Image: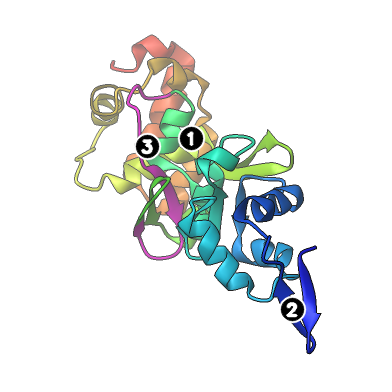
Amino acid sequence: MLKHAINGEKVESRHETGLVMIERIRKHIEHEEFDYQTLLGVLTDYAHPRDKITDLLRKKMIIRVKKGLYVFGEDYRRDPYSREILANLVFGPSYISLEYALQYYGMIPERIEAVTSVTTGRSRKFITPVGAFTYRMIPLPAFQPGMDMVDIGDGRTFLIAVPEKALADKIHADRGVVIASQKDISGYLLDDLRLDPGFLKKMDPDRMEIYARCYGSRKIMLLANLLRRIRRQGANDARS
């Protein structure tokens, strides 16, 4: 029995425990990532649901990623939580791009710890118990094209830039890099980013040109032209 009534008020049973509560929550919340309203909806039968949430946090049965966003504690997870899904939820509108997306696609060898995203809001960085999330502001015309939805099963999805868009966003973000020719852009990709040359042959130059026009970027347009040349000559000729 969760509660009984005294003068019309909800009162929890003295035998109610955090373990019983978390089992109740797990029964109703299927996924590992959830928000405050979802959690509150499960606890409506309790007289003081906010106090119960505080207790769950104190006991590390749930973990606050940021205000209003949670994951289950390590001992109460059914599956790993998704940092990609969390990245979409921590700050928005946003989608994953830049270095993290390049790593996600296997385009660069580095392991990227922070999940990097682009947004139309101001640039932000969040340090959370589940890792760092960074957001770089880009113009709305450059934000709208080039995102893809990834389905990881059980109705869980996240938004991420397609490979061409992730690379275009990265080039735009590295404003201090001087790129004035196809040779410069090739050196930047292969030497600075250590991009796998095989990906250049797979990329769509028409897509890259769209992103160049959205950004108004000569550097990204140089990359679009390089991709066209590579398609004609082969990825091994990226430096020529």
Where is the C terminus found, in terms of image quarters? top left
| Mark 2, residue position | 10
Image-quadrant location for residue 190: top left
Q: How is the image coloured?
A: rainbow
Q: Earlier in the sequence, mark 3 or mark 2?
A: 2
| Residue denoted by label 1 | 164
- x, y percent for residue 72: 57, 47
In front: 162, or 33? 33
Residue span colored magenta:
107-125
**Could you tell me which residue is drawn at 67 percent across and 56 percent down?**
21
Alpha carbons under labels 3 and 1: distance apart: 12 Å
Occupied quadrant, residue 82: top right
Mark 3 or 1 closer to N-term?
A: 3
Q: Which mark is residue 99?
A: 3
Q: Residue at x 48, y 35 (%)?
A: 164
Which of labels 3 and 1 is toward the front? Answer: 3
Label placed on residue 124: none
The mark nearer the N terminus, 2 or 1, is: 2
Q: Position of residue 23 (x, y in %)?
A: 69, 48
